[in-house]
Amino acid sequence: MTEDNKVYFPNLNSLRGVAAIMVIISHLQHNQNKFSKALSNFGNIGVTIFFVLSGFLISYLLLVEKEKFSKINTRDFYFRRVLRIWPLYFLMLFFVYTIVPFIAPKYYISEMERFSIKSLLMNVFFLTNVTLILKLTPLIIRVIWSIGIEEQFYLILPWIMKIKEQLRIKIVLFIILFLPLCKLFLILFEKITGNNSLQTLSSIITVTRFDCMAIGVFFGVLAFYKQFFLGKRCIKYEFFTKREIQLTVYILIVILFLIGAVIRSLFNIINYIIFPWLFAICIINLATNNKSIFKIENKILNYLGKISYGLYLVHELVIFLLMPLFMPFLKDFLPFFKNSIIYIGVFGLTILISHLLYYGYEIQFLKLKRKVSHIITENKF
């Protein structure tokens, strides 16, 4: 590949590292039964960042490919997704469904339905949003719910990016609006009729965050073209990169985070409806605006972003294995020292395992992925 075919967005690997840290902290809080309202929200916020970031980055790269080669090669796109997602995902499924029952028989017996053939098959075919709602996902890999949603969205994304710009934007906006409206309709239907028969469908729609990824696509398209028209209205890139807009967005994120921590009933509305738009504006500035008022690019976060897929998939298994070992020895420690040891142990082992998986396993598939990539990027997605 020539230099013209290389794309790198500053800050995005580091942002992935931040999102992974937030998810791990959230699950550590839950496993210690210390439901700090602020920290327990970190996990959901981190996943929202992952969704928006994926939609932004992949849509932008597909547009670069379309511009440079006059087409998007869907076969190669799907092959790249397989090489990036499947190897570690299926390794984790194999370990959990075949090894865990032998090393943790009590846990396996207590959750046998979650280890059923039905559970395995649905997760193999990336129906992880469904298995989550039906309580068929082993708790130590419950994070895979988001992997399935991304894979489902990737099935339609290249076809959306192939079509004309105006129609593309309309489809993206339809996705953004359709899912929340469906959820609202189902909630109202249940309240008015008292019929809870659609509750499972409502839950699956809530979990399936296509709208969140579509917001990332919306801003990926905007970052690429710098402007587009919605009817007679021109949406300009420059508006979202103004210093006052950036400052307002960051202040809003802090305020809404605190509100969500204090008023739990508002958190889902904030995280599902408002945060994706605010995070997308942050991402477009972090990635493409030289005058971004906030930058997080540094070696440590960049490294954590590089191995963030492993961090995300492995950390709950590490918590599951370490907590029973830690707790008997730490019961008499002061809370600060106990929590410090737990955090250092879990983060240290999670990073070590993720590092080994990345450089000893994932990288072999990533090298092959690079060979079929028409546009090269060092952003790990």
Image (tube, helix red, strand yellow):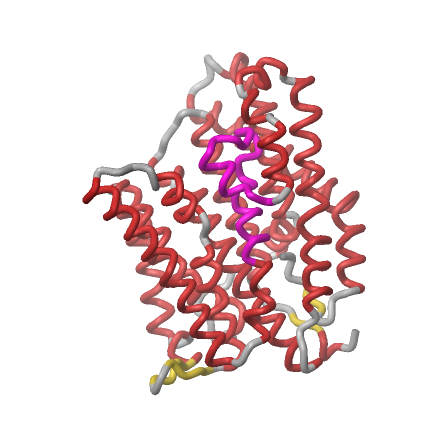
Q: Residue at x 36, y 45 (%)?
A: 202
Q: Is residue 150 magenta?
A: yes
Nearest the eye: 77 or 291: 77
Nearest the eye: 213 or 205: 205
From the viewer's perspective, tell me whether residue 297 is left or right of residue 198: right
Q: Quadrant of residue 378?
A: bottom right
The x, y position of residue 252, in whole percent, is 31, 59
From the viewer's perspective, tell me whether residue 325 is left or right of residue 218: right
Q: How many marks?
A: 0
Q: Is residue 253 above or below residue 243?
A: above
Task: Look at the image and tell me in which quarter the N terminus lies.
Answer: bottom right
Q: Is residue 137 above or below residue 106?
A: below
Please provide the residue range marked out in magenta.
126-153
The x, y position of residue 313, in whole percent, is 60, 40
Q: Residue at x 63, y 57 (%)?
A: 381
Q: Residue at x 59, y 23 (%)?
A: 322
Q: Is residue 112 above or below residue 277?
A: above
Q: Quadrant of residue 275?
A: bottom left
Q: Is residue 22 above or below residue 6?
A: above
Q: Residue at x 45, y 68 (%)?
A: 172
Nearest the eye: 129 or 377: 129
Nearest the eye: 282 or 176: 176
